[in-house]
Amino acid sequence: MHEPADGYPLPPTLEVDLERLRTYWDALKRGGNAIPFWDDVRLSALADAGAGALLIDAFENPPRLRFNTVGARVIARYGQAVGGRFFDEVEPHSPFELLTAQCSATVARRAPTYYRHPGDQPYGRLLLPLWGNGHIGMLLGGIAP
């Protein structure tokens, strides 16, 4: 997971569901912590926005990424369930283009990142870091048309 730390900046405004996700992530922060803990995340708290959400496990040694939980709208867009699978076991087509690079940037920056995919079926993707066991070990994400 090596990517320039300045890639994937947040735009001035986010899609409605992605803004809800970011607001939820901000509300999870404890005390003066800049990053919420992964064990505080409850996708059920996102209501309809949870259908476009995903949780990604980020491993350090060796660096690998795995789909933990994937919302119903994301599964429908991709065309099959990917929960529990490592990224290198999944074909990187819509809505997972450049996902590995964006995850790497999110972990390196320890801050939210955003990717906008243009084309016939454009979408925005937001990734938010989550802390646990002394490192960024999970990412909360959302995909919205």
Image (cartoon, grey):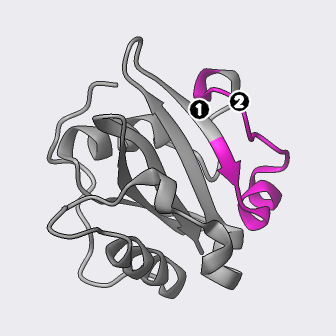
Residue type beneath disc 1: Arg
Residue type beneath disc 2: Arg
Q: Residue at x 28, y 68 (%)?
A: 30
What is the quadrant of the C terminus in the image? bottom right
Q: Label 1's element?
A: strand
Q: Are marks 2 and 1 in contact (CB under 8 Å)?
A: yes
Q: Which mark is residue 85?
A: 2
Q: Which mark is residue 138?
A: none
Q: Residue at x 47, y 75 (%)?
A: 21
Q: Position of residue 132 (x, y in %)?
A: 37, 42
Q: Residue at x 54, y 82 (%)?
A: 17
How far apart marks 2 and 1 lie (CA) works out to: 6 Å
> Range of the magenta residues?
68-88
Q: Label 2's element?
A: loop
Q: Quadrant of residue 43?
A: bottom right
Residue behind mark 1: 66
Q: Is residue 142 above or below residue 109?
A: below
Observer-nearest of 82 and 31: 31
